[in-house]
Amino acid sequence: MTLDIVFMGTPQFSVPTLAALIDAGHRVTAVYTQPPRPAGRRGLAETPSPVHTFAAGKGIPVFNPLNFKSDEAVRTFAAQAGDIAVVVAYGLILPRTVLSAPRLGCINLHGSLLPRWRGAAPIQRAVMAGDAETGVMTMQMDAGLDTGPVLATRRTPIGEDETSGELHDRLSTLGAGLVVETLAEIEAGRNHAIPQPEAGITYAAKIDKAEAEIDFSRPARAVHNHIRGLAPAPGAWFEVTVDGKAERVKVLGSRLLAAADGPDRALPAGRAPGTVIDDALSIACGEGAVRLVTVQRAGRKAQSSEEFLRGFPIGPGQRIGRG
């Protein structure tokens, strides 16, 4: 048995699920995604979303409503509704009129272990908080923000040095399989939606670029989590002054400094937070130290710290960033 599905998603995270639905033999009758947006430098043409591009390549009708506030938008959706809607990082709040239009309602794939990290940026917030574990969940959607009952769960550990970008890609693939499995259970009548617990609710606010500056006065582990949680985008950053000129540098990879690397995890004596403590771009923090592994100067490609230091000399004793 196959289902007639309306798929609703926008970023690259959503694409593996759409591909998996097609590969599983379901009929994707329509795709809803955010309208094309300007991309890159000023003046470039508007760019369709990754989901739009993929769906168009498969010959699937694509719809780009700004919202569902008009009766016409709701009627158009209802005309496509089919058996069920699958929602993966769509980017719009769906009203009850949309949620109830498909015969089997709407299910959502979410990138966290609900009720922890409801909201816009669950993957980044989990890494920034230093969570040891996360996962993906499918849920039956209701009118709340990620509040619906859970249909299925897959858990996975978060690596100590794993970035949000790396975790994003793993969860995207893991989630695609989970959605296909969930639909099979729904088709077989074996799905059991479990209400989310009231305890443990946290919210994953959208990442604000204003929070990307690195504060080296924090403990090294917090600095490390901040860096990897914002990698690759928007990218945590520090400023450094060389020859009287200040430059902003993004940090896309780091690791905690261990005793075997030289300085131990305690703050090196007499070194204020933000002080470079060796020739490998290790930086003293409020507690311990962190080594900056991958960095990116403005307008240039990402590079290893070794490559960076060959063209941008920063040595022991120099202060960088905020601390």
Image (cartoon, rainbow, N blue to C red):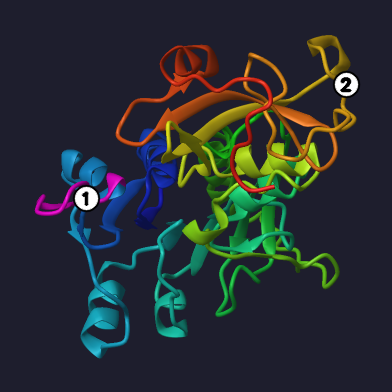
For this view, does 81 lie left or right of residue 36?
right
For this view, does 66 lie left or right of residue 173?
left
For this view, does 43 lie left or right of residue 108?
left
Q: Earlier in the sequence, mark 1 or mark 2?
A: 1
Q: CA distance from mark 1 to mark 2?
A: 44 Å
Helix, strand or loop status at disc 2: loop
> Disc 1 marks which amino acid?
Ala
> Disc 2 marks which amino acid?
Asp
Name the spot of residue 33 as percent of width and height, x first. 30, 59
Res. 39 mark: 1
Instruction: Decide: few, some or many residues near mark 2? Use Cα within 10 Å; few <14, some 14-19, many ≥20.
Output: few
For this view, does 80 lie left or right of residue 141?
left
**Image: 52 above or below 264:** below
Residue drawn at (68%, 59%) of the image:
117
**Disc 1 vs disc 2: which is toward the camera?**
2
Q: Which residues are magenta?
A: 40-50
